[in-house]
Image (cartoon, helix red, strand yellow):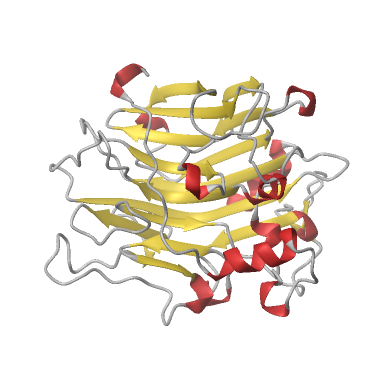
Amino acid sequence: MPHGLREPSMPRPGVLPVWALCVFVWLVLALPTPGWCIDDTVNQGEPAGLGAQAGSAVRSVAVADVRADIDASKPLKKQHWGVECNGVVRLIGEMPQPSVPANPGVDAAGMDRVGIAAPAMGGDVGIALRSAETDSLSSGAPRCELAMVDGARSFLPFARAFWFASRVWIEPWPGSHDEQIVLQWHDYDFDLALNPLMALIVQGDRAQLLVRWEAGSGATVDRTNIRMQILWDGESRQISGHWANLVIHARISPDLGDDAFLEFWIDGHKAASYRGPIGYRPRNPALNQLNYAKVGIYHWLVGNPWDPRYLLRSVYVRRSVLVQDPVDPYVLEQVSPLLR
């Protein structure tokens, strides 16, 4: 990979949270979904569309098509996503408080690792996600991420088109030699410890968006047949140091017949357009439905030592949404207003 960016080696997560049991029951056993698994990400009292502008002729996104929603402007305890940060791996609604404090005696101990805050020069507040090298590990790595993993609707549609859009403030790390993943899509076969099937990686003054897929004809059993392609390689300042709207339109599948693709926009400008396979072929086909999205900071350990010039890393999330495409597909102009 150019600019010193290396392939991350993903650690094997620890004990699975409660949502894993929920999905196992729903998908594998084909039993009725228990009440505690039901995803009600979208408030049924909201209007029939999201993101419409007054007098606009552009069709707005239907509430029913919003599969997952992280929104800093609404009470976090009532939302439906997971937190992996500073040793905490829990659904936000199960936490005593919708925040994660720092441990005593660590770098930047006075700053919560998860909380509502504004960047130093950012204006709008967001969900602040902070990670220090001295923090407790979460699922085997320094990280502070939000994961769309609460309920079956929260997972990425497989072989069907969808939108993943995030309004984020990524702190600049000029000159740093280590790498952080700030957006990623991950598979669910944790035993294989595969790298993300999509990752947006920041290393100092450079950033890259890449995808991976299983190139063999059979199930993915190791990394032998996995291929990787960089879709965008640019200056990190394009996505950091300001509130950036990062929008992806995609269909994921490793099978050519499913016509997988990915389009990537930065603040309304198309940065990448790719048509080809994306993702893995799990040994259990039910796991096709369990790919999931994450936003925040992930710093893998193998071959990626922490740059000591940056004791604390920060990313702020104003909103991050997963939207399924209806029969009449959405376009960028319909999805982008969700991030305002």
- Does residue 222 show up? yes
Residue 330 location (% of width, % of height): 78, 40
Compared to 156, does 139 lie above or below?
Answer: below
Could you say which is closer to the camera, residue 97 or residue 15? 15
* Relative side of 81 to 195, left or right: right
Residue 231 location (% of width, % of height): 52, 22
Residue 301 location (% of width, % of height): 27, 42
Task: Residue lying at the far bottom in this picture: please name it.
Answer: 96
Could you say which is closer to the camera, residue 276 or residue 246? 276
* Relative side of 12 to 271, left or right: left
Task: Residue lying at the far top in this picture: please name it.
Answer: 2
Q: Residue at x 50, y 24 (%)?
A: 224
**Which quarter of the rendered picture does the N terminus lie within?**
top left
Q: Residue at x 24, y 66 (%)?
A: 111
- Among the 4 quarters of the image, the one containing residue 180: top left
Compared to 21, does 306 lie above or below?
Answer: above
Count of residue discs: 0
Q: Residue at x 71, y 59 (%)?
A: 153
Q: Residue at x 51, y 56 (%)?
A: 147
- Does residue 115 show up? no
Residue 156 location (% of width, % of height): 66, 47
